[in-house]
C-alpha cells in the first residue's frame, strides 16, 4: 500500500518540526495509541489498539527516525506485532517547506504492508483503513499544531 499527500499547516516550519519530534504530540495524534515513549534520537516504543474490519488487535512495536535533515525532512519507519492478528510495518518520507503565506507545507509518501490475519482481509479493506489512519493522524496533527 502506498499513499502520498500534502497538507498546509498554519504554523511556522520550526513549530511543525518540533511537533513531529515530540512523543506527546505523536501519542495524541496516532489513532488508538495507548502509549508512546522514547525520543527522536533513540526511537520510540508504541502500543496501539486498532480494529481493522473484523480483526481487533493491540500492536506493540518500535518507531525510528532516519535520514534526518532538521526542519526539512526525515524518514519515519515502524513495525508492530499484533499477536495472532499479524503484523504491520511501513514507513513514511516526510518533508517540510515554507508556504507563501507563512505557514508550512507538509508532504508525505507512505509505504505500508501487513501480514498474518490482517493480510487475509484483502487489499481494498487494508488500503481504505490505511488512508483513514493517515487522514486521522494528519487531521489531529494539524489541529494540535495550529492550536
Image (spheres, rainbow, N blue to C red):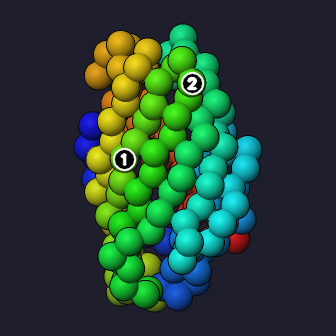
The residue nearer to you, when weighing 134 against 121, is: 121
Residue wearing tag 2: 83
Lateral position of residue 144 relative to residue 74, left or right:
right
Between label 2 and label 1, give the one nearer the viewer: 2
As helix, strand or loop, the secondary structure at mark 1 comes to strand
Residue 72: which quarter of the image? bottom left
Q: Position of residue 39 (x, y in %)?
A: 62, 72
- Is 32 on the left-hand or right-hand side of 80? right
Asked if labels 1 and 2 touch by Cβ distance under 8 angstroms, the answer is no
Left or right? Give the position of 26 relative to 63. right
- The Cα atoms of the two marked residues, 2 and 1, are separated by 17 Å
Pointer 1 residue: 90
Residue at x 32%, y 51% (from the top left corner): 110
Residue beneath the point at 29% across and 57% down: 109
Q: Is residue 143 above or below residue 136?
A: below
What is the quadrant of the N terminus in the image? top left
The 10 Å Cα crowd at callout 1, few under 14, some 14 to 19, many 20 or more, is: some
Q: Earlier in the sequence, mark 2 or mark 1?
A: 2
- Give SS at disc 2: helix
Q: For label 2, count other residues whose C-alpha is less than 10 Å away and answer few (under 14), some (14-19) or many (20+).
A: few
Residue 73 in the image, given as x and y percentages of width and height: 36, 77
Residue at 45%, 31% (x, y): give it. 87
Q: How many marks?
A: 2
Is 96 situated above or below 29?
Answer: below
Residue drawn at the location 61% of the way across and 19% of the way down = 56
Tag shown at residue 18: none
Amino acid at each position: 500500500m502506498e499513499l502520498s499527500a500534502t497538507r498546509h499547516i498554519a504554523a511556522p516550519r520550526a513549530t511543525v518540526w518540533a511537533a513531529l519530534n515530540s512523543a506527546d504530540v505523536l501519542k495524541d495524534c496516532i489513532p488508538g495509541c495507548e502509549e508512546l515513549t522514547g525520543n527522536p534520537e533513540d526511537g520510540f516504543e508504541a502500543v496501539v489498539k486498532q480494529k481493522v474490519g473484523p480483526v481487533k488487535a493491540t500492536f506493540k512495536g518500535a518507531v525510528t527516525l532516519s535520514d534526518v535533515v532538521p526542519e526539512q525532512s526525515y524518514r519515519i519507519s515502524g513495525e508492530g506485532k499484533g499477536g495472532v492478528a499479524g503484523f504491520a510495518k511501513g514507513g513514511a518520507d516526510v518533508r517540510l517547506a515554507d508556504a507563501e503565506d507563512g505557514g508550512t507545507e507538509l508532504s508525505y509518501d507512505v509505504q505500508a504492508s501487513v501480514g498474518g490475519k490482517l493480510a487475509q482481509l484483502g487489499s481494498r479493506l487494508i488500503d481504505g483503513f490505511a488512508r483513514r489512519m493517515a487522514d486521522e493522524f494528519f487531521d489531529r496533527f494539524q489541529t494540535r499544531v495550529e492550536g
